[in-house]
């Protein structure tokens, strides 16, 4: 079988081509447009399927160097922070805690479902746990971390099951999140108004920001600002890890610094930060890094799933949709921001934070109204605050059901 290893530059170039192809297909497909399927999902997901087919036929094996994916992700969340405000967080304080509470409850529910359904099907409860919050809310990182632990407790194949379940969850979360949000908005006839409205520039419709919003001088100024904030964010993360033992995802520190500096700049007026220009830069970074994430999916790991684990995951998805539509949406206020938050909840509840971002971005892009509240609350809860409860819960379930 022919094996190709793509370097970082080639991988990025391929991601840009796939992103453009996804935007092209979405623009010309009424079905894809109506479902709000993100262009990165269309291009990246389709390419991942092709890679799987070629690999399955023993024709070609591709490996990617996604070294630029993390810097692009951090740059995107930096632009989100530059568009946010502390006032908005204060206004949405109740919603933040409601959303966070839902994340914590979901971690418990997914673990209980995984263990419970596995016991009913007659398989090791720890394998069922691998199809719970370990691989769904936890994503690939938690799956890779807890899989070997479960194997050390006697659950053979736990790591493979966890990684395969994480792949299944990422696919399900990416495909279902935006249609659920759109269904809520259309079914409830919601006013498409966010608490803080901003235009979400789009690569998919070919819309261009006004020339004066992103000329060479403005682009240079904003890129310098974004890169400096990214560096400060990395420094903040390193300092917290070294002195307090607190580990933050790479983008969270940058987002915090960006929010702080944006609000200080609003008072001092040191530099001009046009929202449209920031949005355009953020959209480009978002599109590339999400396409990289989707095109790198290893679908062949789904072949490792047996029918019992697949059954557990189907139950998890059904319960997730029902919880989101009939409970969380109402608790969050039954408005446009709530629908966007639900898209994010579906994304990171079944997959990972990039799924949540893709889902929310697709909804906002479709309705041309950007929900800053959702883009600040979801990454903060989904990647950081949820672990306060989720990881101890997973640890408890591992010990409670070991050798049962």
Image (cartoon, rainbow, N blue to C red):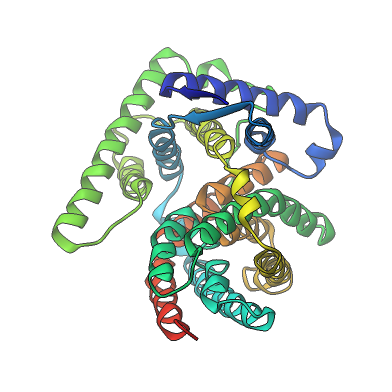
Please indicate, yes or no, whether residue 194 appears anywhere in the rendered image: no
Q: Measured along the vertical axis of the image, is residue 116 above or below residue 14?
A: below
Does residue 307 appear to the left or right of 79 in the view shown?
right
Q: Measured along the vertical axis of the image, is residue 196 above or below residue 135?
A: above
Please indicate, yes or no, whether residue 365 appears anywhere in the rendered image: yes
Q: Residue at x 42, y 22 (%)?
A: 7
Give residue 131's position: percent from left, percent from top: 58, 67
Quadrant placement of the N terminus: top right
* Of the pair 174 and 285, the residue shown nearer to us: 174
Q: Residue at x 40, y 75 (%)?
A: 153
Which quarter of the figure has residue 291? top right
Which quarter of the figure has residue 62? top right
So how many labels did they put on this image? Answer: 0
Q: Residue at x 64, y 26 (%)?
A: 59
Give residue 136's position: percent from left, percent from top: 55, 62
* Of the pair 178 and 63, the residue shown nearer to us: 63
Q: Residue at x 43, y 29 (%)?
A: 65
Does residue 175 appear to the left or right of 245 in the view shown?
right
* Of the pair 323 and 337, the residue shown nearer to us: 323
């Amino acid at each position: 079988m022919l094996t190709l290893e793509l370097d970082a530059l080639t991988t990025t170039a391929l991601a840009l081509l796939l992103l453009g192809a996804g935007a092209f297909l979405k623009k010309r497909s009424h079905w894809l447009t109506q479902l709000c399927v993100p262009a990165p999902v269309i291009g990246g997901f389709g390419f991942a399927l092709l890679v799987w087919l070629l690999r399955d036929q023993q024709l070609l094996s591709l490996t990617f160097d996604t070294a630029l994916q993390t810097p692009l992700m951090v740059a995107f969340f930096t632009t989100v922070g530059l568009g946010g405000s502390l006032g908005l967080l204060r206004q949405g304080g109740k919603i933040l805690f409601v959303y966070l509470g839902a994340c914590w409850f979901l971690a418990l529910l997914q673990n209980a479902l995984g263990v419970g359904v596995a016991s009913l099907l007659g398989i090791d409860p720890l394998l069922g746990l691998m199809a719970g919050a370990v691989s769904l809310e936890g994503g690939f990182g938690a799956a890779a971390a807890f899989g070997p632990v479960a194997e050390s407790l006697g659950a053979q194949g736990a790591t493979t099951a966890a990684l395969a379940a994480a792949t299944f969850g990422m696919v399900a979360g990416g495909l279902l999140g935006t249609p659920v949000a759109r269904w809520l908005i259309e079914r409830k006839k919601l006013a498409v108004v966010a608490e803080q409205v901003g235009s979400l520039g789009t690569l998919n419709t070919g819309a261009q920001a006004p020339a004066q919003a992103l000329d060479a001088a403005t682009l240079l100024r904003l890129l310098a600002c974004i890169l400096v904030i990214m560096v400060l964010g990395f420094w903040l993360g390193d300092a917290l890890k070294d002195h307090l033992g607190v580990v933050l995802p790479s983008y969270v520190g940058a987002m915090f610094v960006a929010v702080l500096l944006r609000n200080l700049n609003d008072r001092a007026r040191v530099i001009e930060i046009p929202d449209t220009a920031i949005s355009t830069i953020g959209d480009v970074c978002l599109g590339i890094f999400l396409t990289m994430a989707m095109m790198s999916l290893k679908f062949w790991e789904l072949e490792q799933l047996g029918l019992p684990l697949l059954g557990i995951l189907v139950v998890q998805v059904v319960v997730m949709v029902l919880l989101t539509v009939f409970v969380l949406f109402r608790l969050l206020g039954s408005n446009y921001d709530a629908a966007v938050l639900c898209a994010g909840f579906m994304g990171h509840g079944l997959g990972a934070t990039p799924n949540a971002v893709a889902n929310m971005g697709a909804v906002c892009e479709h309705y041309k109204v950007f929900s800053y509240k959702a883009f600040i609350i979801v990454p903060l809860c989904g990647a950081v605050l949820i672990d306060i409860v989720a990881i101890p819960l997973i640890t408890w379930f591992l010990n409670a059901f070991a050798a049962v």
